[in-house]
Amino acid sequence: MKKFNGYYGDFGGAYVGDELKKNLEELEQAFYKYIDDNEFKEELNYYYKEYIGRENPLYFAKNLTEKIGGAKIYLKREDLNHTGAHKINNALGQALLAKRMGKKRIIAETGAGQHGVATATVCALFDMDCTIYMGEEDTKRQALNVFRMELLGAKVIPVTTGTRTLKDAVDEALKDFVVNRENTFYMLGSAVGPHPFPMIVKEFQSIIGKEAKAQILKKEGRLPDAIVACVGGGSNAIGLFSPFYEDTTVQIHGVEPYGKGLETKEHAASITLGEPAIIHGFKCYSLLDENKNIAPVHSVAAGLDYPGVGPEHCFYHATKRATYCGSTDKEALDAFKLLSQTEGIIPAIESSHAIAYGTKLAKEIGKDKIIIINLSGRGDKDVAQVKEMGI
């Protein structure tokens, strides 16, 4: 793989102290050493196939397509992966890197719990010590995933600072990494953070788009007209988008969490309403308060309430290669119910943001078009929360 400087246009970089920078350089060197190594690739592909269950289907959602009455809608079924979401793609890849680097202690942050579950899973598989930081608010919303992580042998630490959600979990994980960097591998779960994390996560998640491209060419004999994915930090989205980047006939749509509405302060629309700033060691569009500090954010989806966004998404937006829009909490919950009742597929609330926007787009662009929506995770984890909300 060609070496990369860590900047996507004006975004990205590694704004960290010198000691931590040494560890990031060690990680970068290991990544470049192994990503093109045949033995590493064979082992990764073995676990993708035999353990995760890849490749997963590109499913023609016939009932949903007919109900919407627009473009043909295909779903990339990341919800069928072992552990229930796309997060396992990256966790497995990083675990194999950690193993080769001789790191036996793994730490991670998690919002909805899917990355935490994926991290705990691979740590159990490879006999690694596992500590997961999770905002206290998210531990309540996603109690089932907390139990799953603990069942898998992980130590889950509720974070009680700030808004007690994903941003604060990342803060605590980074503090741990700084203190314990000599023996610890930080398994960052989204395409955010200081270089080389966004590059590494993108590489392991790009299996989504690579498969989807090959599958749609086989099924339809052509590329889709549009691809759609939800964007919090942005790992599932960059995994789908990046293999289509040079296919300029394909529209790219990232769907942000508009929460209770852009007119309120209760949203997490970092690209739509943010401005360039440094967060968690990298530069991206960030939501700031009147004092230019990182603002509290909101989404009904625990995996999307992050006040920044991956630097490659920022670059896609700045260069107009992709369009970033959004779905509100209500729209996402309506889509959660819609997909459940039309296709018998219960989506994650995060993925429901993409379903909500993707179905609107299908109506707009017409029946002779094709859309791929990334169904990034399944909704088992969300059923209790949705039930309590009376949806």
Image (cartoon, rainbow, N blue to C red):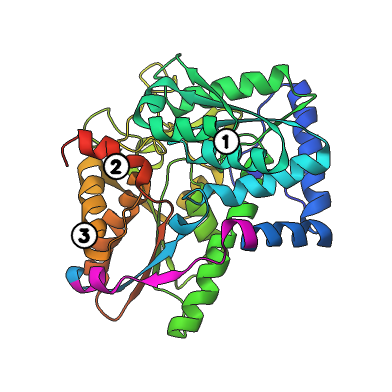
Q: Crowdedness of circle 2 by 10 Å Cα count: few (<14), some, many (20+)?
A: some
Where, by quadrant of the figure, is residue 273 drawn? top left
Q: Crowdedness of circle 3 by 10 Å Cα count: few (<14), some, many (20+)?
A: few
Q: Residue furthest front?
A: 151
Asked whether disc 1 touches disc 3, contact meaning CB atoms under 8 Å apart, the reply is no
Q: State the residue at coordinates (62%, 56%).
A: 51
Q: Of the residues shown, which amino acid type is indicated by label 1?
A: Leu
Numbered tag placed on residue 383 in the rendering: 2
Q: SS class of the residue under badge 3? A: helix
Q: Residue furthest left?
A: 390
Q: How many marks?
A: 3
Q: Which residue is mark 3?
A: 341
Numbered tag placed on residue 24 in the rendering: none
Q: From the viewer's perspective, is residue 231 above or below residue 73?
A: above
Q: Of the residues shown, which amino acid type is indicated by label 2?
A: Val
Q: Which residues are magenta?
A: 50-66
The reply, left or right, for residue 314 in relation to residue 3 is: left
The disc, 3 or 2, on the residue closer to the chain's N-terminal end is 3
Q: Residue furthest top?
A: 161
Where, by quadrant of the figure, is residue 59 drawn? bottom left
Spatial separation of the CA atoms under disc 3 and disc 2: 14 Å
Spatial separation of the CA atoms under disc 2 and disc 1: 21 Å
Spatial separation of the CA atoms under disc 1 and disc 3: 32 Å
Q: Which residue is mark 1?
A: 152
**Which quadrant, please, contains the N terminus?**
bottom right
**Does the rendering let one see residue 321?**
no
